[in-house]
Amino acid sequence: MADLVEEAKKKASYTAIDEHVDSSTSVIGIGSGSTVVYCVERLAQRVKDPNSALKIKACVPTSFQSKQLIVEAGLPLADLNAHPVIDVTFDGADEIDESLNLIKGGGGCHLQEKLVAAASKKFVIVADYRKESNALGVQWTKGIPVEVIPMAYVPIQKKIESLGGTSKLRMAAPAKAGPVVTDSGNLILDVFMGVLRGDAVLDTHLKLIQIPGVVETGLFMDIAGWAYLGLQDGNVKRLANVTSQEKQWKSV
């Protein structure tokens, strides 16, 4: 089963890179997670091909992990302040619904992932077949990752309770004693607000983001234009949201 999942991730990643990176692509955002490893692998193969017409000027990471992937692959590393407009970003997801709403942040990088995605003309999701769902919170049952300011995590938890939800402070054990600390020095609450469909995704995000001390939620709406899902049979399923594609292109 593990080999099958990895092959699905690889197939989806290679297909996404080949369909969205061409000679006009200059700046690429690199997301975080296990699937993105294969995106970087394929991108490096194409850049280093002696016959390649690619002219990649910069790769912008979303985490310590993706920064290391870029460096180890010999790709040009840059940051968002140097390249505030990105041609295309490739990233993974913990769950994807039929409208390409996402839960992200299982790896604790959703703040930086959302910043890079928001600066991208195209935001492309790559994942395996296990991540597709008809509603958020069905397949991914570990809660909505919410990045919070450390000094206020308990008041934030109490506010979440008043909204009808529950939350858990994400701990780093057994690798480390104490809580998970993000690349930005914050903590993560995994928030449980039930299964989210349709307008409930945006409504839940708005309720959470308005709580003082909440930095960002792991709910991504109206931003992913494409998703590539590696299937068990070796094929790749393509999903698209034309409205998100147009909205994202105009907003950058």
Image (spheres, rainbow, N blue to C red):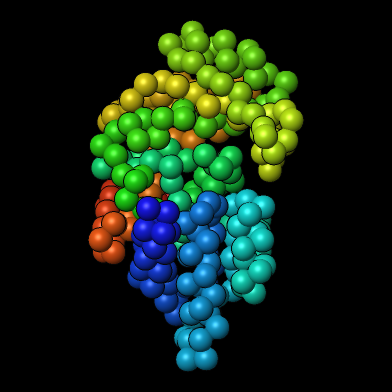
Q: Position of residue 119 (x, y in %)?
A: 52, 53
| Viewer-closest of 98 and 3 | 3
Q: Position of residue 238 (x, y in %)?
A: 27, 58
Is residue 33 visible in this depiction of the protein?
Answer: yes
Q: Position of residue 227 (x, y in %)?
A: 34, 54
| Viewer-closest of 148 and 95 | 95
The residue at the point 48 percent across, 64 percent down is 38
The residue at the point 44 percent across, 80 percent down is 23
In this view, 147 is above or below 168: below
The residue at the point 42 percent across, 54 percent down is 2
In this view, 68 is above or below 100: below
In this view, 75 is above or below 9: below
Is residue 29 visible in this depiction of the protein?
Answer: no
Most extreme residue toward the top is: 162
| Viewer-closest of 152 and 8 | 8
| Viewer-closest of 148 and 79 | 148
The residue at the point 37 percent across, 53 percent down is 1
Q: Position of residue 184 (x, y in %)?
A: 69, 40
